[in-house]
Image (cartoon, rainbow, N blue to C red):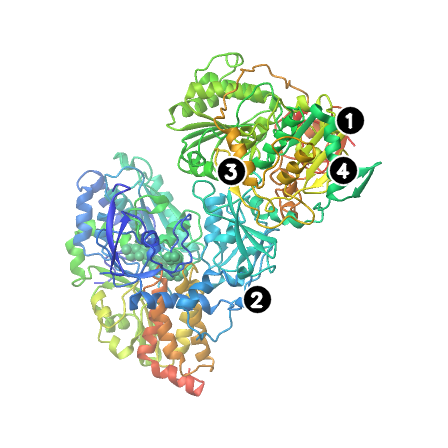
Amino acid sequence: MSEDQTVTIEVDGREIQAKAGQMLIDATDAAGINIPRFCYHKKLSVSANCRMCLVEVAKVPKPLPACATPVAEGMKVQTRSPLAIAAQKGTMEFLLINHPLDCPVCDQGGECELQDVALGYGDDVSRFVEGKRVVMDKEIGPLISTDLTRCIHCTRCVRFGAEIAGVRELGATGRGEHMTIGTYIEKSVDSELSGNMIDVCPVGSLTSKPFRFRARAWELIQRDAIAPHDAVGSNLHLHVRRNEVMRVHPKENDAVNECWISDRDRFSYTALNSAERLDTPLVKTRGEWKESGWHEALTRVASGLKEAGSDLGVLASPGCTVEELHLARKLANGLGSERIETRLRQGDFRTAAGAWLGQSVTDLERCSAALLIGSNVRKEQPIFGHRLRKAALEGCDVSFINPLELEMNYAARQIVTPPAAMAGEVAAVARAAGAAGPLIDQAEVTERHQAIAERLKAAPAATLLLGNLAQAHPDYAVLLTLASALAKATGAVLGQLPAGANSVGAQLVGAVGDGLDAMLAQPAKGYLLMGVEPGYDLWDPAAANAALTQSGFVVALSGFRSESLEAVADVILPVSAFAETSGTFVNAEGTWQSFAGAVSPKGETRPAWKVLRVLGNLLDLQGFDHDSSEEVLAEARQQAEGRQLDNAPADAVTECRLVDAALTRIGDVPIYAVDALVRHAAPLQKTRDAIAAAIYINESEAAKAGLTAGMQAAVTQNGTRVILPVTIDPNIPNGCVRIPAGVAGTEQLGGQFGEVTLEKA
Amino acid sequence: MANEVCLRNNDLERPWLLEQYQSRGGYEQLKRILAGEITPAQVIDEVKAANLRGRGGAGFPTGMKWSFISREAPGQKYVVCNSDEGEPGTFKDRDILRYNPHQLIEGMIIAGYAIGATRGYNYIRGEFWEPYMRFQGAIDEAREAGLLGENILGSGFDFDLHVHLGGGAYVCGEETALLESIEGKKGQPRFKPPFPAHFGLYGRPTIINNTESLCSIPVIIEKGGKWFSEIGVANSGGSKLFSISGNINKPGVYEIPMGTPFAELLEMAGGMRDGRKCKAVIPGGSSSPVIPGEQMLDLTMDYDSIQGAGSMLGSGAVIVMDDTNCMVRVLERMSYFYYEESCGQCTPCREGTGWLYRVVSRIENGQGRPEDLELLEDVTRKIAGRTICALGDAAAMPVQGMLKHFRDEFEYHIEHKRCKVGA
Ligand SMILES: Cc1cc2nc3c(=O)[nH]c(=O)nc-3n(C[C@H](O)[C@H](O)[C@H](O)COP(=O)(O)O)c2cc1C
Ligand code: SF4
Ligand code: FES
């Protein structure tokens, strides 16, 4: 049977077309015919357990579930015949007998599928006079609340875990009425996609813990937004009440995030009203921070910037909008400076390349072989991780070359090697694939390299992807050079997983320069920081702190108070955060997605683009008279016109800087440490993925240093010494120690990768 | 004419031993087949001619089931034997495992040969420890003798057999739940179609049959399908094991031809205890609707006869009750069973079985309401035919049967808050 063969069926007397083999409910959904359902979910496997979708099919005496009945040519279906309605109502009655029916106190009330369907199919009086079932709730972590008495056993959450998240965290244990959803052994639900379970749960059994009991669905106004934490560009619905973002839901877009979003995108809104939110300008006078009015603060900034003149450096987060970055670059240029950088965690700037996905988001799930170099894609960009997992389940051969072993949720080949040896591994695959050149010719090829090369070559659609760990590598240029050679030899698409929501946009509007070294090696006279906390957001916090401290004037545009910022800045201007400002992000595949502000700026904060515009005016610069962010965008787009990103490096770099040291630091940025908003989102910081600063080291390496788990130890990097606890982690290779970056306790350390020494504290 | 097929070696001293089984011609049919005397197609034709209907309860023609699998289809296929024997009242497969394990093994190898499967599993009820040990012993013996494993008797045909001990859930007797259980998953029935013949164990083509069905195969091959068919009556070929229990003198397993009058079976089982009146009979395991005693005494033990009386031959578990039994109490006990054993995945069964049990229990305990009987009937109608597996129907039918034939006892209970019969 061919996949796209069309059949004609008759539903409620109406002829509709359907794909052969398609389930009836998909065909009726497409035709706009509504059949009630609970267990069915278009992205999950069919389980046909709720029996709500029973319909009458001609010549079949029993009602059949539309979600599990394939269409066939000439099939005649009645969705509202007496038999069908009786079956649907029968199921409804069963579903309600043990349901609490206390919708007024249920968090799902008003947006509950059971409530909605009960309105059409339920009776007003219950015939059930027995005691109702009660189920003990379970504690499954900081993001999801359980109210298991409300569960209707549709198993959507279980199937979501098994099929989408790729970890079976929830299951249905027990038989019959005693069947309950749970973790079996007391445990939290930790998947980076776990919040989607709240969405798939049709009732109030799994609800959002941070949102629970804070608003009613009908009080909320839905506004669109684009997720600000990674380069996926997930489409969001912000649910707003009285000028406050109450929660975040996915907005369906099959080309980007389908109907899912990461927990990071779902729960980071909780930071918007955190106690550390900055809502008035702060000015430092004689070492003392004072709140100030905008006028005074701006005047001070204008004079500071004027002083800096052409010796101004701009460090902006790749999560800044196109509009903000465009104006920041324009401002720097107006003052005669070309120094602006958004690649804040890049470890090597010896070559220039345009970093983007190299393909469309949906291409990721269609590839048949993939090699990821320096990436924990699942935690870096959860939705891309999900797309790759989908590919893997369809048979895509996925391999990783990484400095630490990853917890996988699908079968993949992992080459784990100390950072200094990563280039050699990529070179070996390149050699196996028939490439030649420096490093490649000397590489030692093993069966593993051969296997990866062969799969990449044979695959009809292959891709190489460089992730955050590669970008932060001191030999990123070498890795990119080798990957490029490998891509040529195999015909694979060369792609990168840019770190920020607008990393690609930043490149298109020219908000990239000569690199961080060029910015920080020699302190500039003045710095403009945008969305940057120097201790957390930069590749080498120690070097950054040194440069910023020595600089004459530092102004920061920030949404949050931050010790690390207050230590170096002279003025901090409070800017509107995510959801409070309009703007545009260009995602990894190069799609421009604009959004409006969903709530008005908090307190005295102003959208950053407006602040920059005023500064331009105060500095008497040309071209700062935009009336709206759309005008800024139009100008930025014009600038970007014709700019094409190419992942291939401009120059081949084959000289490795990272040499084998006794102990090398791997400084990854944990999923909930990537930017200020996430770092201030309290619920996310309580999850298991909110990794704390520590010395993660394997047992034998720890023994060598005389360390055991739980001990405090001193790490020294570039002369800075920091005390951290020791955690034994078998996923770290010999010769390495993982000390995450971007987390409290690492503000004083050096580059994300580099030599460190350890000693007992 | 008793004990001709599955229990035919019961007269031997230790019939479970290989040597004793072979003394009666055991494994000779397998040898003939492997020597090429009988082709796979002929095996299936013989089983079809035998008119053997599945002994697990549904009575599906075994030969037809086997012919759904294409022998030539590439890849692994499986033969699975269902020895879960969970239906209350049924205890016949236990005797096969205990007294005639080799005949079952031979039957399974022949089934494997017929459909081109090289792997078999026998899923044995968790509580059957002794039969399990016995059966495992027989497998070991057979393997030792070169009758199981690779290249059986030098024929080039491979077939190996493993035992899977269940965990004590009735629903795991349902064929697809059983397959899930073997796969190491929670025993929950799968939605059908696809049927096991297309998507069975580990997603591969699989035949799954009851112990008694498979154990009958060697005899069918030996004596011919026609011979087997003629033991029984039209539509019900062969002889059948009946597990008869209740208020009778000699409860036990009896192998008698299909079509034997119930009265004869009752007599073999020693008649009613204390000479009391046969009030009611559950003819085919707890799922089959009850039949009043007088009516039952006129019926013969075969599919059509029992079906004609509005019940089912099922697994052949005959529960005989005398006039000391209160039917409300009987039903309460049965409803409790289904309430506890529902796997819980589909709504009507998960919710409905609990509802049925609670209402019956209320009536039994003097809390019944006049509208309850109507309610019970309505609930059973809303379960039957709307579930994933037949457990839903199995829970509904006994209630319907009881209310049909013994409604007066329920009404009495509701009105007088006590039993009509002095139990
Ligand atoms: C709830 C339920 C329990 C069942 N239990 C058993 C059982 O214990 N033994 C059995 O042989 N069949 C049992 N069956 C029937 C099987 O699903 C299946 O029809 C049978 O094993 C097929 O074998 P047969 O064709 O040889 O009868 C059960 C069915 C249901 C719905
Ligand atoms: S009918 Fe009962 S036992 Fe069968 S699948 Fe449904 S809930 Fe499970
Ligand atoms: S939606 Fe079809 S059975 Fe649940």
Q: Chain of mark 4?
A: A
Q: Assess whether mark 2 and mark 3 are in contact (beta carbons under 8 angstroms).
A: no
- Closer to the camera: disc 2 or disc 1? 1
> Disc 4 on helix, strand or loop?
helix
Q: Earlier in the sequence, mark 3 or mark 1?
A: 3
Residue type, mark 4 in image: Glu
Q: Earlier in the sequence, mark 2 or mark 1?
A: 2
Disc 1 and disc 4: Cα gap in Å? Answer: 14 Å
Same chain under badges 2 and 1? The reply is yes
Circle 3 residue: A232
Same chain under badges 2 and 4? The reply is yes
Q: What percent of the width, then of the height, locates residue A715?
A: 74, 29
How many other residues sit within 10 Å of disc 3, few (<14), some (14-19) or many (≥20)?
Answer: many
Circle 4 residue: A566
Q: Chain of mark 2?
A: A
Same chain under badges 1 and 4? The reply is yes
Asked if residue A664 shows in the view, the reply is: no
Q: Earlier in the sequence, mark 2 or mark 4?
A: 2
Residue type, mark 2 in image: Val
Residue type, mark 1 in image: Gln
Residue type, mark 3 in image: Val
Disc 3 and disc 4: Cα gap in Å? Answer: 32 Å
Circle 1 residue: A550
